[in-house]
Image: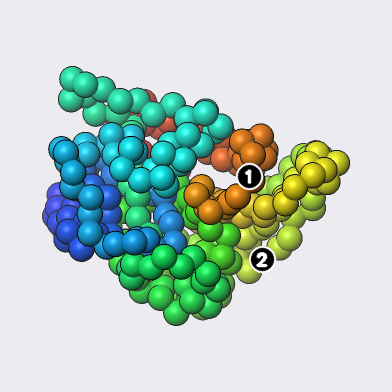
Amino acid sequence: MNLSDMENRLKQINILRDSGRFARVAHEEMLGGMMLCGYNPGRSKKVNQENSEPKSFSDSFNRSKFNKQSVKWLNDIFGYKLETKTDGEITSDNSISQTNWLAEASHSINFSPEDYIKKIDQFTKVLDPIRPSILFLFGITMFYALCDDKCQPEIGKILGKPEPIPFNDLLVEFEPPKQLPNYAIMTRPTKAVFPSGRRFWFGYQQYEKCKVFGLPHPTGSRGIQGHYIELAGKPFIKPALENYKIGWNTNKKTSPW
């Protein structure tokens, strides 16, 4: 990445941030970092600018229920401890960006995969300047949309080609994976492991430049238990975050693959 490309991407992030597409101003560490993506901006497209401007993802976590719950999942369930510093030191927390697939504000989350496919341009508009190495889609319908053939031409320009995923057959806690287009898979814990309650689906997809995880929305999954989400992290999420953290600590940059 040359200086001109970096400056253009940071400029684009700030323009999108001013229109409510990102939660905070651009930082160089966000480029190639970790992206957390929800459905839409919710009640308002306006950025909450109460108090001071958030410097990092966890610094802004108290500004919405989504942030609070996603921070909890990263910290407590997936073991990715967010590092907050008061002396201005840059940490891997600075590399996390938060956005939404859809640009329009709405109370509703009742969208079909086709709704997201039709608005793929709204998603790639925020995806392209970040070009994340880890992408969390908080809403399994978005995951269905992402791996659809109709989205691949635009997604491929940013994340590269989809790649096969080595699913460990010894993971007896999970049902055999459902194969989706473009090497994406979906699975869920077996009834023996989780005998009561709704068993949510988890999605996994890998591209040349990014690992994608489809999870239930942190604020919309009633009754979902921390233990259940922890199961989702076992085969792919925890190892990916460990490598991500190692890459950051070693190189002070975010993309280890």
Q: Position of residue 244 (x, y in %)?
A: 44, 35
Relative side of 178 to 105, left or right: right
Tag 2 residue: 180
Q: Position of residue 222 (x, y in %)?
A: 60, 50
Mark yes or no: residue 2 visible. no
Relative side of 183 to 104, left or right: right
The three-letter code of the residue at mark 1 reads Ile
For numbered disc 1, what is the local secondary structure? Answer: loop
Number of numbered discs:
2
Q: Which mark is residue 224?
A: 1
> How dense is the environment of label 2, judged by Cα within 10 Å: few (below 14), some, or many (20 and up)?
some
Mark yes or no: residue 188 visible. yes
Residue displayed at 23% across by 50% down: 48
Residue displayed at 21% across by 21% down: 86
Relative side of 215 to 70, left or right: right
Q: Position of residue 34 (x, y in %)?
A: 39, 45
- In the image, is residue 251 above or below residue 235? above
Q: CA distance from mark 1 to mark 2?
A: 24 Å
Relative side of 18 to 155, left or right: left
For numbered disc 2, what is the local secondary structure? Answer: loop
The three-letter code of the residue at mark 2 reads Leu
Q: Position of residue 219 (x, y in %)?
A: 50, 49
